[in-house]
Image: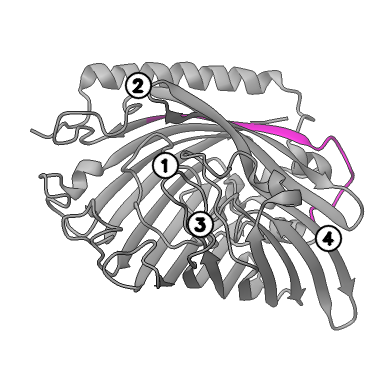
Amino acid sequence: MATVFAGSHAFHRLMHYVTLASLAMLCLWRAIPAHALPIFARQTGQNCVACHAGGQFPELTPYGRMFKLTGYTAGERTIPLAFMGTADFTKTRNNKDVNGNPISPKDGNFVWDAASIFLGGKITDKIGAFAQYTYTNYDHQNGDGKWIGHWGSDNTDFRFADRFIGAANDVILGLTVHNNPTVQDVWNTAPAWSYPYISSPVSNVASPQFLPLIEGGLAQQVVGTGAYLYWNKLLYAELTAYSTADGIWSFLSKGNKPGDPNHPQTYLRGYNPYWRLALTHEWGPHNVMFGTFGLIANVYPNDGDSIPIFAQGVTRYRDVGLDAQYQYLLEPHTITAQARYIKENVGDAQNFVFGDSQSANLGSLRLKASYIYQAKYGVSLSFFNVTGSADSVTYASSANIHPNTQGWMPELFWIPYQYVRIGVQYTHFTKYLGSKANYDGTGRNASDNDTLFFYLWAAIW
């Protein structure tokens, strides 16, 4: 009989944890002086709402996008240091496999799961940076079942930018060096900064199991060097080349290395192109963007010991995306909406990844809308749909040998202070790995993976 959500005892235990954590966080924030703002707010002297839509990190406003496009250089140089942490609770509808073993070992526990250190801001009048280093508390389990933490590089972006304003033209020209495809992007449709902005770190079933490579598959594995142009707040264009973050660039992939089964290094052949085009328009409290982006990547396979194989060829990924974003920003109301579709075609001549064919495809759709009142009370609703060609090797965990996964994600959140967000999120699956019912051949249904997720997310100084 499928396990359902915990009864009244577990519910009261959750509320007890939530109350203690919330009180502790609120007391902490009342003890911090008002001038102690995280990096960019401290540098610009602006409230977080100036850069983030309705105060909802990481959604950027037009002002926030211009701050990033001009190289994080607006304002005065200040202490370039800040910290962020998350604590959360995950509960899966059915957390037992066919043998009665837990699917996600930390399910049903309130945990502190991660903390980040940020370095960034203005370096010179034309050079700035955003660098993140993260500790994950429950990264993996060793052979004895003990949880092991992990320090590693996170999203990092160095920029040089200059702005030329004339009678008829306003042009920003910039260079970027970063370690995650689309982390340099300024719209929240790009995979690196797209919804969900936070999700369960301890669940093994709370999100789609298979996604296009550009949706995180090269994060903290590569170095991207690119150039961009933003003309008259109308046209954005960018070209970037990605290669393996090793040698002098190894600090961008710190925490990943060949031979590490938990954090193997991904190696690319040569330089791999990425492009981005976007049209934007602002009128009154409204702004809109329509765009496209793409990545072609040649990836070397790893052997059974997580060591790259350089002598047998590569798997070629071609990811092409279409995206759009709308924002209405006029206090006390904030409305934002994002849409993105990515189509991936894979050429796998040596069958490194796929077993039934030397070519495959994967599609990923994400739709999301949010409403925030007084930059404090928010609600979001998201829909996701992943489809792809069948393969008995890559999708062996599916009885239908398909990656097809679909579902809805509603979320409620509260921002009591500008650096604190408390929220509850629910993921409901209408399809999982190709089927609504018995998707794995052992009787497990898509809805068994439905996940309740409560989180406390805060940044300090």
**Counting residues from the N terminus, which is met first, the one under dot 4 or under dot 2?**
2
Q: Are marks 3 and 2 in contact (CB under 8 Å)?
A: no
Disc nearer the start of the sequence (3/1): 3
Picture coordinates of residue 258, whole percent (x, y): 56, 45
Residue topped by disc 1: 412
The C terminus lies in quadrant: top right
Q: Secondary structure at mark 3?
A: loop
Judge by depth and name the residue closer to the eye, 443 or 247. Answer: 247
The disc placed on residue 160 is 4
The secondary element bearing badge 4 is classed as strand
Q: Which residues are magenta?
A: 71-89
Identify the residue position indicated by label 2 in the image.
Answer: 14
Asked if the residue under mark 1 is in contact with the one under mark 3, i.e. CB atoms within 8 Å, the reply is no
Depicted 93 relative to depicted 267: above or below: above
CA distance for labels 3 and 4: 36 Å
Residue located at (26% from left, 68% from top):
356
Residue type at the position of mark 2: Leu
| Mark positioned earlier in the residue sequence (1 or 2) | 2
Lower sequence index among marks 1 and 4? 4
- Observer-side mark, 3 or 1, equals 3
> In the shown orientation, is residue 357 left or right of residue 460?
left
Question: Which dot, 3 or 2, sits closer to the camera?
Answer: 3
Residue at (84% x, 80% y) in the render: 169
- Residue 448: % across, % down: 20, 42
Inter-mark Cα distance, 4 to 2: 47 Å
Tell me if label 3 and label 4 are in contact, CB under 8 Å: no
> What residue type is disc 4 on?
Phe
x, y percentage for residue 1? Answer: 7, 33
- Give the label, 3 or 4, closer to the camera: 3
Q: Is residue 78 magenta?
A: yes
Say which residue label 3 marks: 309
